[in-house]
Image: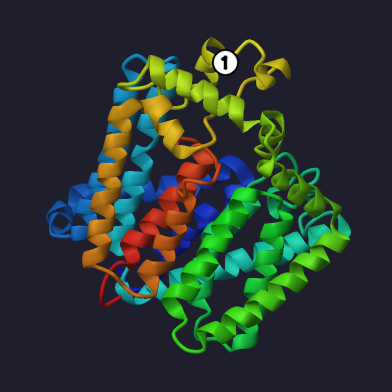
Amino acid sequence: MQVNSSKAVIGLFVLVIFLLPFSRYTELPLLILSLSGIYGLVKHSAKLAQMPQFKILSIVFASYFLIVMISALDSYWQEKTFTVALASLRFYLAGITLLLYVEKKDIPWLFKLVSWLTLFWTIDALIQYIVGFDLIGRASYEGRLNGIFGEHHVKLGPLLALALPVVMIAMRNLPSFMRWISVLLMIVVIILSGTRSAWIMMLFTLVAYWLHHVKQRRWQLLFKTSIIASVLVSVLWLFSTDFQQRINRSLAIFSTSESAIDFALADRLSIWETSISMIKEHPINGIGARAFRVAYPDYAEVDDVWQAKGGVAMHAHHWVLEVLAETGIVGLIIVFFAIYKLFYFIKNNYHKHYSWAFMIALISAFLPITSTYSIFSSFWSICIWFFGMGLILSSQKNA
């Protein structure tokens, strides 16, 4: 392939994320990358065998595929579980394309594209907050700011929180006022998105950046940041009733009342209790990946709040509980094995800027105190794959 093909493949890669707000359209660039991966796997198998990135990609994918397939043996929803397993092949094949055609020298181009995209989403969301609709006419979710993702979705906050470390590294050589303004605007949008897990992911990234990248005048910077944060929170408190409500709801976690704690956790307690019941009944290989909603009525309590509303919980709302409930102890062991192998690879191929950004994004997605989307769902699995592949691609010492 020609030299420019590297940037073209990176463009397709970022297009996957760019099209996430438009539902299934995101599958088109994934399909193109996957088909190219089939060709690459056949044509360049010898070259791939010599690449350590291919080895770790294969280990991580095989782990994911294996836990889903094992859970499918007696899944509550076998058709769906098998579909999840087969659909995951596209991630592996697309990853092969990226490994074959993305060149080391073009990794900064990946960071630039992600930064431009996320800053566009940030500005678009701020316009939506001010006038009520964004640049393509989409209104926001009630009580939340969700920008280009529009009504009935709360995806913008977590996705911006994932991208934040990439943006911070991409801008490290820009004038300080540009870095401050860009990051500050992203923080405002993440806060206004109302997704508390995104808040935690954002705070984790900011602390990690301070610890890892700020070497001079660290305490001076921390002091200035604290002042700005205090002013920002005060302004949001005065002018955003939605922000006030989210804070008041969060503070209920310190109550001694179980109902108040459940209110603070957005009715998560009953979901977690039901998840534990599933784990006790199916400890080995779970109830099946993505079968949570089907199995839910069989394990929920009689007074379950979600069934009282005429529905069920779609997933466990905690990745460890989800893995245990849907794929069992076997699944959790294999997941931890894959995490160990991935971070061992990163340790031996670490790039202090590029590896750090995608590694922090991935860690923030798996923080044990957050409640995010299902790792087997289309949206969140694409996000995890994107930042995971970014980590593998950028973990080259000479990148």
**Which image quarter is the N terminus in?**
bottom left
**Can residue 260 be seen in the rendering of this structure?**
yes
**Which image quarter is the C terminus in?**
bottom left
Residue beneath the point at 68% across and 21% down = 305
Left or right, 172 with reference to 260: left
**Can residue 40 be seen in the rendering of this structure?**
no
Residue 195, how many percent across, how many down?
Answer: 66, 49
Residue 141, how many percent across, how many down?
Answer: 77, 44
Image height of 250 relative to 309, above or below? below
Residue that mark 1 sits on: 300
The image quarter in which residue 371 lies: top right
Residue beneath the point at 63% across and 47% down = 155
Residue beneath the point at 74% across and 44% down = 249
The image quarter in which residue 183 lies: bottom right
Left or right, 189 with reference to 280: right
- Looking at the picture, the colour scheme in use is rainbow
Depth order, front residue of 146/22: 146
The kind of residue on which mark 1 rests is Ala
- Structural crowding at the residue carrying mark 1, measured as other residues with C-alpha within 10 Å and reported as few (<14), some (14–19) or many (≥20): many
Residue 299, how many percent across, how many down?
Answer: 52, 14
Left or right, 38 with reference to 45: right
> Number of numbered discs present?
1
Residue 56, how many percent across, how many down?
Answer: 23, 52
Image height of 62 relative to 365, above or below? above
Residue beneath the point at 54% across and 40% down = 373
- Residue ranking furthest to the front: 256
* Label 1 SS: loop
The image quarter in which residue 351 lies: bottom left
Depth order, front residue of 84/253: 253
Left or right, 353 with reference to 149: left
